[in-house]
Image: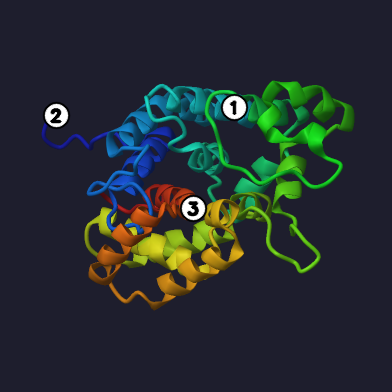
Amino acid sequence: MSEGVDPPRRGPAANAELALLVEVAGTPKPGNVDRRRDLADLRFEQFLAGAVGARPGLDRAAAGAPVGEAFEAAVAGMSEQSGGNTQFGCLLLLVPLVRAAAADDLSPEGVRSVCEATTVDDAAGFYRAFEHVGVAVADPPPGLDALDVRRGADAVPALRERGHTLFDVLAESAAPVDDAGTPGDANARDWVEGFPRVFRAAEAVAADEGPVADRAARAFLDLLAEADDTLVRTQHGPAVAREVRERAAAVDSLAEAESWAGELVDRGINPGTTADLTAAALFVALERGVTV
């Protein structure tokens, strides 16, 4: 590049791809794939391939495509590796954030506006995305079997009959799952509330120091200590989810987290929802000027 010429700025789609790459490179992230450890059925390289494969869908989001269309395209591209689901939840968060950033309104209000404007067609795209990869989700509430996301495109007629937008679908997922007030899906809660946890974690990443991959690992631990991980609760129950949250709150350093990381992998406990939120926070931090 010629002397005196400023390099081109990465756009939102490129920063979203970079956020996916930095998230999986951060280590240690107890229970998750990172650059030092694989899971039995998922490898680091598959996450790299998933991030690259998602880029065309992220480009669509940056260009103003409907959220559901861009999300389905991103998931379809992400799935073009041998591991299956690597970043479904990350992309659910990233697509509206990319849309908001491309419109120069990357703020809680801006992204909430994007989410609230979603349509029934966006919900249909979300459901079709489940046909590309297997995703661990909780059973639907009683009486809503017709809207089970695991039905994929087969559920779209029921969606259209009820007039459910993507915002409506995720608001239902975010609702408490029982009379005791147990929170619903953490990603869905952030999605319908203007991404409060994502923006708080992004501020922490920006205020942190050192390599961004290390900041990602610290942000992951902070988020894990803040609330029960939805994927852990779905796969292992509320007691294990609480145990993991409390253990994360007691971790004082990345060095201390290192041995715990191996323990969770050995136990098959994967706080994947927290990794999704971490990737979204990294995107916001990158868009707001954190350099790599």
Q: Amino acid at mark 3?
A: Leu
The CA distance from mark 1 to mark 2 is 40 Å
The label nearer to you, 1 versus 2, is 1
Describe the element under mark 2 as helix, strand or loop. loop
Q: Which x, y percent locates residue 37?
A: 26, 48
- Residue farthest left in this picture: 3
Please report the residue visible at 58 percent of the width from the left and 57 percent of the height from the top. 233
| Residue located beneath label 1 in the image | 129
Where residue 146 appears, x then y in whole percent? 81, 32
Q: Amino acid at mark 2?
A: Met
Please state the horizontal and vertical placement of residue 78, each as a whole percent of the image. 44, 28
Judged left or right of residue 198, residue 287 is: left
Residue 205: give x, y in percent of width and height: 37, 61
Where 207 sits versus 107, above or below?
below
The mark tally for this picture is: 3
Tell me if I can see residue 189 in this picture: yes
Label 2 or label 3, whichever comes before in sequence order: 2
**Dot 2 corresponds to which residue?**
1
Look at 24% across and 46% down and name the residue there: 35
Q: Earlier in the sequence, mark 1 or mark 2?
A: 2
Say left or right for 238 vs 210. right
